[in-house]
Amino acid sequence: MDRTAHLDKAFYPSSVAVIGVGPITAGRFYVESLLGSGFQGKIYPVHPNGGEIEGLSIYRSISQIPGQIDYVISCIPARFVPQLISEAAAKKVKVLSLFTSGFSETGSREGRKLEAEIARRARDGNLRLIGPNCMGVYSPRSGLSFADDLPRECGGVAFVCQSGGNAIYFVRLAAERGVRFSKVISYGNACDVNESDLFEYLRDDPETDLVTAYIEGVKDGSRFRRVLKSLSAKKPVILLKGGVTTEGARTASSHTASLSGSNDIWTALVKQYGAIRVDTLNEMVDLAVTFRFLAPHVGRRVAMIGGGGGASVLATDACASNGFTLPGIPASVSAEIKGALDSEAGLILTNPIELNMFPQATQKITRSLLSMGSVDLMLANCVFGQEPWDFFDTWFDLFCDTVLKVHREIPKAIGVVLVSELNNKQPHFVTLRRRYCEAGLPVYYSMSSACRAIDRFVRYHEMRHHWTGGMP
């Protein structure tokens, strides 16, 4: 069987059976997630006791379901899974996802033996297994989801994730900053479908522009190297390796029974094939945001607006530490800006410039700075929590209006930094973040993380230009 055969049915099923749907079970959660996410296909809940859930009849076994089943989600105890696979094979099921745990990740001989048994039955039955010990698939185009609060809108980012919890966390983090996904798959122990299968599939997937991944270990190192090479030659790949320390590798083994591999080998592998390696999920979100919203030709000459005195000093350090420069403001531009400020005595204009001192002229100043030929990128620095008065909420609204208006007028890159450890869940902050994201601007939560992400983005495209001889 072709290693990527049937995977279309994992992402675009016309029917889903959920096995193990009781009153308070993971199966019930999956059914509710499918309904809440707008899945348009057939949903078949299954439990030996029968009954009804959310207006759907609960079948007593998979064999009683009258129609074709493309995709099955297992939420039953591990000891019943071999029989389920045999029944699914008899129904010509294409893909079976195992939320069920209790296999090789337990470290027991019995768990490893049971996992080998279900893998054998799947091969014999010509169906693919995702997992065990995983969340399965989130595919917004088909409405397939493992949580009902994930975006329904589609995007170009794929996420291959060995961890179920990390899959949900990453999607939620990235979604609140405007990232939308083509496909997300949590694949757990990878007894059948593994990271190489998924990379190979996504390499040729027209809906995916960027591949992100959290991997604890690989099943076949040689194949993974080949597939990573071919994937990264076509699309950017951002990779977070779990289990890089001895202690982390031990935890990875007990989590998904993964053999972690040498950290040095992973570093060399990623560098050799032009992928980008990150150290945290937050860092991966920053890069996903950058690839999603910035054009590849961004340069390193920065104009910075906003912030305060001390915040601007720290922001300038962050820029310089990551290879960016802040050009001075030419006399002609300085004169133009001063003309909009009613000739304030002794005014000195520098880059960065603290616009909160000039609320009536923010748009004029911002447009003038971004129009400078010596500027490639503007960073808008919004530091919440340092202002002493409530009326600064109005200032942040004005600042946002200005940035969005200039963004529409001038075709240069703008990044927005919303610094707010104090109140980053407050309604006003959330509203501003949403406005920037909906306008197509990348949002970061610190100047250092913004500069680090944009630096790596720029270096990636510089190297890619070198590798391809200038071809896109």
Image: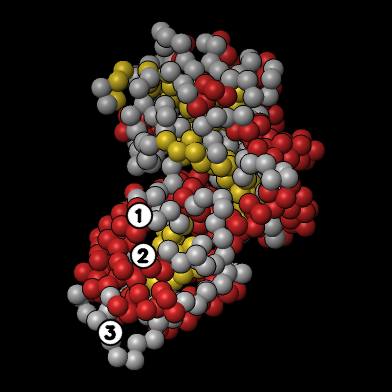
Q: Which mark is residue 367?
A: 2
Name the quadrant containing residue 23.
top left
> Seen from this angle, which residue lies furthest top?
66
Instruction: Give the CA separation, mark 2 to mark 3.
Output: 18 Å
Q: Amino acid at mark 1?
A: Glu
Residue 3 makes an appearance in the image:
yes
Q: Amino acid at mark 2?
A: Arg
Report the residue marked by disc 1: 409
Q: Which mark is residue 198?
A: none
The answer to whether mark 2 and mark 3 are in CB contact below 8 A is no
**Total label count?**
3
The answer to whether mark 1 and mark 2 are in CB contact below 8 A is yes
Q: Amino acid at mark 3?
A: Ser
Label 1 or label 3, whichever lies nearer to me, is 3
Q: Around disc 2, counting alpha carbons within 10 Å, would you say few (fewer than 14), some (14 to 19), or many (20 or more)?
A: some
- Residue nearest the observer in this picture, 48 or 415: 415
Tag 1, which secondary structure?
Answer: helix
Residue occupying image coordinates x 34% and y 49%: 438
Residue occupying image coordinates x 22% and y 80%: 389
Task: Please tell me whether residue 470 is drawn above or below residue 36 in the rendered image.
Answer: below
Q: Around disc 3, counting alpha carbons within 10 Å, would you say few (fewer than 14), some (14 to 19), or many (20 or more)?
A: few
Relative to 56, 284 lies left or right: right
Quadrant where the C terminus lies? top right
Instruction: Give the CA separation, mark 1 to mark 2.
Output: 9 Å
In the rendered image, residue 5, in percent from the top left (x then y), is placed at 63, 20
The answer to whether mark 1 and mark 3 are in CB contact below 8 A is no
Report the residue marked by disc 3: 343
Name the quadrant containing residue 84.
top right
> Seen from this angle, which residue lies furthest bottom?
346
Name the quadrant containing residue 42.
top left
